[in-house]
Image: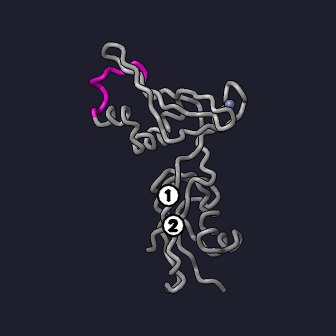
Amino acid sequence: MLPWFVRRTRLPLLSLRCVDCRSESATTGEGRFRVNANGNLLDVWLLVRCVSCDRTSKLTVHERAPVRSLDPAELHGYHVNDPDVVASRLLDPLLARRNRFSLDWTGAWRLDAPSTWLDEAWPVQVEVVFEDPVPVRPERLIAHGLGLSRNEVLRRVKCDVPLRRSTRTGFAFIVMAGD
Ligand SMILES: [Zn+2]
């Protein structure tokens, strides 16, 4: 079984409408949190910036959360703007749902596929591992990874998930020999 890896190359942009200029694209930039303490309660926001007009908005990460309810390592991550904590919060579907944005993965990921696979005996088995939850259509990913047309993929590939439906979790497929 050959492994393929789907990995992000940078943080995705956010599809989020700016209240000033109506642009629909925002970025976390380097990634900054704002933490506000009120007695024993904490508000935590992730700051994002409109890519057109630079207006900053705050995405709610925690709202009036008791300090004790937060993992100390995570809280430290908010204070020092830890890039890993920025990434894990940004990619958390709960944050997107709560703040009504979606992620724009265009140009923010790559497929790492070994190029030696052609030497393998047919049929070739491949397992796709998602290191980041990038939504991809298996049909397009496989066509790209193997350098095949999408018609050829539909003819030669047996996959354990629907080829045309977007997924962000691992799957496996088998490529049959060509004619
Ligand atoms: Zn704007």
Q: Is residue 114 left or right of residue 151?
A: left
Q: Which residues are drawn in magenta?
A: 63-72
Label 2 CA crowd tier, 10 Å (few <14, some 14–19, many 20+): some
Q: Residue at x 51, y 78 (%)?
A: 124
> Percent from the top left, x then y, of residue 6?
51, 60
Q: Would residue 143 be found to the left or right of residue 123 on screen?
A: right
The answer to whether the beta carbon of the residue marked 1 is less than 8 Å from any atom of ligand 1 is no
The foreground one among 50 and 3 is 50
Residue 58 or residue 119, whichever sits in front: 58
Residue drawn 69% across the image and 68% down it:
150
Q: Position of residue 167 (x, y in %)?
A: 56, 53
Q: Does 69 appear in magenta?
A: yes
Q: Point out which mark residue 7 bears.
A: 1
> Residue type at mark 2?
Asp
Horizontal relation, residue 117 to residue 76: left or right: right
Contact between marks 1 and 2 (CB within 8 A): the answer is yes
Per the model, the C-alpha gap separating discs 1 and 2 is 8 Å
